[in-house]
Amino acid sequence: MLKIPNINSGLIALIFVLLLVSISMANAHQPRLDIGTSVSIENPIMVDDPEISKAFYGELDGKPVYYQIHSPQPFQLYVNLLVPTSPGQGGELVSAEVTDSSGEMIMFLNGTNSTWTPYFEEFGGDYYLKGPEATLNVPAGTYNIRVFNTQNQGKYSIAIGKIESFPANEAISALFTLPLLKEQFFSKPVSTLFFEFLGIILAMGSLMTLLTLMVKSRKSDELTSITFLVGGILTPLLWIGTIITTLVWAGVIYQNPKNILGLFNSLILMIILILTWRVNSKTRDAGKEKLPFISTFILVILW
C-alpha cells in the first residue's frame, strides 16, 4: 500500500498563512454583495473609505439603488460601472449619477451612450462588460450615488475607489463572499450546486461520524475496535464525496483557469485529497495503534 508521509499541522497552518498573504497581495476590488438588501434614498448603502477600491454587487428591482459616502476630508472619487456577462443575466446597461449634499450633480456616468468592453476579473475568474468610469477630486462632505436604468432592472457592479488594498481580514471575508457571488450574482448552474452539495454531504457526514467515534474511542479499547470497523465502512463514502466534489471543481476551474480564488481552492482540495488518503489508510488498518484523530479533525475544518 502506498504510504502518505506524516503531515505536520504546523506546515498546513503555514500553507494557509501563505495563501492568505497571496490573496492580500492580489490586485482586486474588495467585494460587497448587496443583492436582496432593502435600499432607498433614505436608507442607502454606506461606503466607507471611499478611496479604497471596493466592488458593490447589486440588482435593480424596479427602483434605483443608492449609495452614500461621508468623508470628513477631501478625497479622490473614482466610480466605474460593470455588468455581468454570464448567460441568462438579462437586464439593461446601467447609469450612475453622483450628487453632493445640496443635491447638485457633480458626476454622471451615462451607460446608454458609453462604450462597454469585455472584461475578465482575475481574482474571482468572472466576465463582465466594463462601462463608463470617472475620477474627480472632491472636498469633504456627503455624496450620494444613484444607480439606475430606464426599466430599473438587471444586475450590475459598481466599483468605487482606486487604491487596491486587501488586508488579511478582507482576504478571509472574500473567501466567504465570492462563493455567494457565484450563486446569487452569476447564477451558478443548479446541477453544479446539487452535485457539489451531494459531495460535501457525503464527505462531511462520514467525517463527522468518524470524528465523533474517535473522540469516544479514547475511553475504551472496545470503542476503538468499533471505530476501525465503522471506518472501513465510511471511508468509501468519504472517497465518493471527495471525488464528486473534485470532479465538480475540475469543471469549474476548467472554465475559469486563471482566477486566484480558484487557485486557492485547488490547493485546499489537494490537501483534502492527501488527508483523505491518510485517514482512509489509517482507519482501514485495525493493526494500527492510533486512530488518525488530528488528520480527521483537520479534514473537518477544511471541508
Image (cartoon, rainbow, N blue to C red):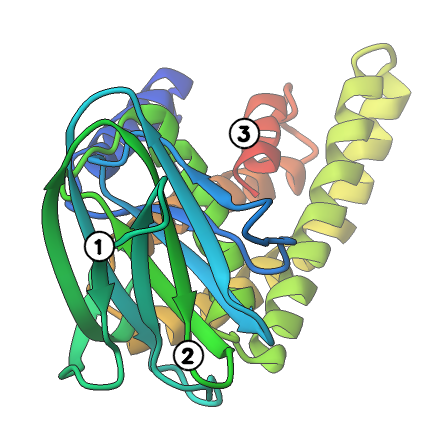
Q: Residue at x 69, y 66 (%)?
A: 198
Q: Residue at x 39, y 44 (%)?
A: 268
Q: Which residue is mark 3?
A: 298
* Label ID, residue 79: 1
Q: Could you classify mark 2 by the number of other residues whose Cα lies within 10 Å: few (under 14), some (14-19), or many (20 or more)?
A: many
What is the quadrant of residue 191 in the picture? bottom right
Mark 2 vs 3: CB contact within 8 A: no
State left or right for residue 126 relative to residue 135: right
**Residue type (three-letter) at the residue carrying disc 3:** Ile
Q: Which residue is mark 2?
A: 149
What is the quadrant of residue 207 in the picture? top right
Q: Earlier along the polypeptide chain: callout 1 or callout 3?
A: 1
Q: Position of residue 194 (x, y in %)?
A: 66, 73
Label 3: state its secondary structure.
Answer: helix
User: Which is closer to the viewer, label 2 or label 3?
Assistant: 2
User: Which is closer to the viewer, label 1 or label 3?
Assistant: 1
Q: Position of residue 105 (x, y in %)?
A: 27, 56
User: Which is closer to the viewer, label 2 or label 1?
Assistant: 2
Location of residue 200 with respect to 21 vertically, above or below: below
